[in-house]
Amino acid sequence: MSKVLGIDIGGTSIKVGMFSTEGTLEAVTKIPTGEITSEAAFAVVTEGLKALLAENGATPEEVIAIGLDVPGPVDDDGKVGMLANIELDPEGLQAAIKRTFANANLAFVNDANAAALGELWQGTAKGANSFVLIAIGTGVGGGVVANGKLISGAFGAGGEIGHVTVNRDETDACGCGRKGCLEQYASATGIVRSYKRECKRLGIEPVALDGPTDTLSIFNAYRAGDEAAKAALLTMSDYLGYAMAQISVVVDPQIYLIGGGVGGGFKAYAEDLRAAFRKYCLAPSVATRILPASLGNDAAMYGCAYEALLEREA
Amino acid sequence: MSKVLGIDIGGTSIKVGMFSTEGTLEAVTKIPTGEITSEAAFAVVTEGLKALLAENGATPEEVIAIGLDVPGPVDDDGKVGMLANIELDPEGLQAAIKRTFANANLAFVNDANAAALGELWQGTAKGANSFVLIAIGTGVGGGVVANGKLISGAFGAGGEIGHVTVNRDETDACGCGRKGCLEQYASATGIVRSYKRECKRLGIEPVALDGPTDTLSIFNAYRAGDEAAKAALLTMSDYLGYAMAQISVVVDPQIYLIGGGVGGGFKAYAEDLRAAFRKYCLAPSVATRILPASLGNDAAMYGCAYEALLEREA
């Protein structure tokens, strides 16, 4: 039976899903890794993949496609660009995997783009012709699907919607070097920043936070009636709705899906976000649906597997 | 020999091109029309089309595809939305044409989207996988092509890039009802408005203008060293470059094409526009090319013909 693997590459481990060609997740494993830049490190990955297959009665020969999602740009030709947050030699890993899995088509996919493809394959967007996934985590990533296909972009910047400019008056710089990006307000980091600012403004003692991306505590404070948390989430919703209105005059999708870690708190800000989008959007797009993504942290693993399978069939 | 017709529908006349299936423009005619809402008016159109064919040794039976471009939204299903500037009954005209041209596939296309398809078929973008046409005329329209296909949008608002918000501090309303749209600064109307404002600010006597969209006189003033004209074109370039930087984080095209009436003055502002885009864009997209469109006012006529042909082959 043909198998497809999806490999979600993180900073300290990789998560691997074994799928049927129809998209059923049959098994999943986590393989601890460090820097993936040496033959020894590549072997840890390939041995881990072989072990997953063996445990589930499959062989390397049955694997026809392997997707790898990476936290960084991948252009239309599948070439991986600069990876700021992980140590990975993409060509080296690719060569090592190819030696072990001779029948498999390999594809690298940007993580947010992969998450969009995952939602298209087996998630909320199944069967949709056009949608935009907004993945809210430490940063804000995105995946744009139009005419049923992902838009990676000529320079790998398709769906980099964390970098839509939403506030031209911002004085702090975004990680990208520009100022006033959506990511500065709507990412986990951005929400924490807004929260602290609002606490100061309102003279409220902030709740204890477990680091600079702990939105969970802020969502809890919100549910407990914390005014600063309410204001921070309102700021996020307003800027996010505004950015979506900008995206709609470019690609005008049927659906927006909100995913990523902060996507899990969707219910808390769904109504404010929908109201903000309706306020800012061009009239024809007012009926665009705004929904939570459904595959959670597995979306990218699904999606890179799907992309590798699609490219094999193309 | 199979023929394809492209019909550019304006307020007082239609322009019709007869094309080979390879995209050679073999003949063109202009048919005066008034409101196209009655059987008599439909007959003027169909008789005009038949005359064009007869004059060029072709028959209605040879016509396999007819495109019609309209100045208004057309959704992914080819349905025409609200037309603000012309009196047209799309269904009525469609039915009348179908009766005369039984072998032809008919397609309505938004005019800016059609212009993009025209440039893809026979213009600067021939063979490009992704590009965005920005059509600058009385308003600012656009056509977005990604993965080799036009993005019409779920609600017909794909490529409505005249309505990217570029100035959240604007107090005047755009035609769409929102405030600070690109169109308010980069359209012919917008350039004239900026010019007058700059004349007042600088204490310069404005040159004589032939109406509220006479950018030709402003381009002439610019070439003669008029400071207000220079400032107005700089404002246009800055906002346009900023809007393009927003578009690039969504679809990240290979090329921007500047077309429409004001596109003809491209040389005057090309360097300022390229500099503005480079200043505002996300780093990976800095190499995006910015070029003039090449089909001028015929682009939409080419493009709607092409779309009708493509849909027939699909």
Image (cartoon, coloured by chain):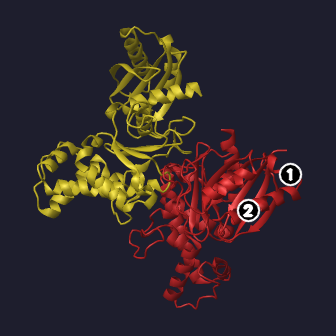
Chain colours: A yellow, B red
Q: Nearer the viewer, residue B83 or A210?
A: B83
Q: How many marks?
A: 2
The chain ID associated with circle 2 is: B
Q: Position of residue A32 (x, y in %)?
A: 32, 23
The reply to whether residue B71 is in sight is yes
Numbered disc in front, either 1 or 2: 2
Q: Are marks 1 and 2 in contact (CB under 8 Å)?
A: no
Name the side, left or right, on which B35 lies relative to B29. Answer: left
Secondary element type, mark 1: loop
User: Badge 1 is on which residue?
Assistant: B58
Name the side, left or right, on which A45 lies relative to B42. Answer: left
A1 above or below A93?
above
Q: Amino acid at mark 1?
A: Ala
Q: Nearer the viewer, residue B45 or A68?
A: B45
The reply to whether residue A176 is in sight is no
Q: Which mark is residue B206?
A: none
Q: Amino acid at mark 2?
A: Ala
Q: Which mark is residue B43?
A: 2
Name the side, left or right, on which A241 lies relative to B218. Answer: left
B175 above or below B211?
above
